[in-house]
Image (spheres, rainbow, N blue to C red):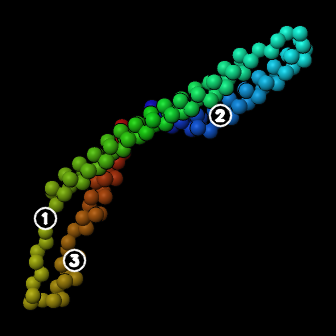
Amino acid sequence: GLFFACCFDIFMSSIAQVVVLEVFMNQLVAMGEYHEAHPEEPRSYLEASLIIFIGVFGLPMFYRSASVLVTLVEGYYTQMICAGLASVVFEKALALPAGCAPRSAEDPDDEDQQHSSMPNVIQIVNVDIIMCWSGLFK
């Protein structure tokens, strides 16, 4: 769904305007050639008017609709991913110790030993986030 919406949005924002302009120019050339071949018949501007109407009013409305659709779908998936990652971090935070042992004033050289024995919380949570990441896109 999101891939199709993104492709449609990109098509409408860049390629569709060029296609409509090409169709309009070809219609003007065909109209000029038809008038040269049949000078006694009046010119019909209906086809060119419809192309301009669709190109000027219809195409931008389709582009805006596709852009809104992509934004809504992207927001939905972003919210689901952030909620999943936040729940993983929260569950892991509940299992981790709340603090560390206070430093003893008797042994000032013990500081390096305390820091090396503390768990690296970022590393522990990152492992769970990476394991959860693939499941959030399903």
Determine which residue is flagged by label 3: 115
CB under 8 Å between callouts 2 and 1?
no
The residue nearer to you, when weighing 72 against 44, is 44
Within 10 Å of disc 2 (Cα), the crowding (few <14, some 14-19, many 20+) is: some
Distance (Cα) linking label 3 and label 1: 15 Å
Determine which residue is flagged by label 2: 17
Q: Give me the residue at 63% from left, 24% from top.
A: 53
CB under 8 Å between callouts 2 and 3?
no
Q: Give me the residue at 53% from left, 36% from top.
A: 9
Task: Give the numbered dot on residue 98.
Answer: 1
Label 3 or label 1, whichever comes before in sequence order: 1
Please state the total of marks drawn on the protein image: 3
Q: Percent from the top left, x then y, of residue 29?
A: 82, 24
Label 2: state its secondary structure. helix
The residue nearer to you, when weighing 25 against 35, is 35
Within 10 Å of disc 3 (Cα), the crowding (few <14, some 14-19, many 20+) is: few
Kind of residue at badge 2 = Gln
Label 2 or label 3, whichever comes before in sequence order: 2
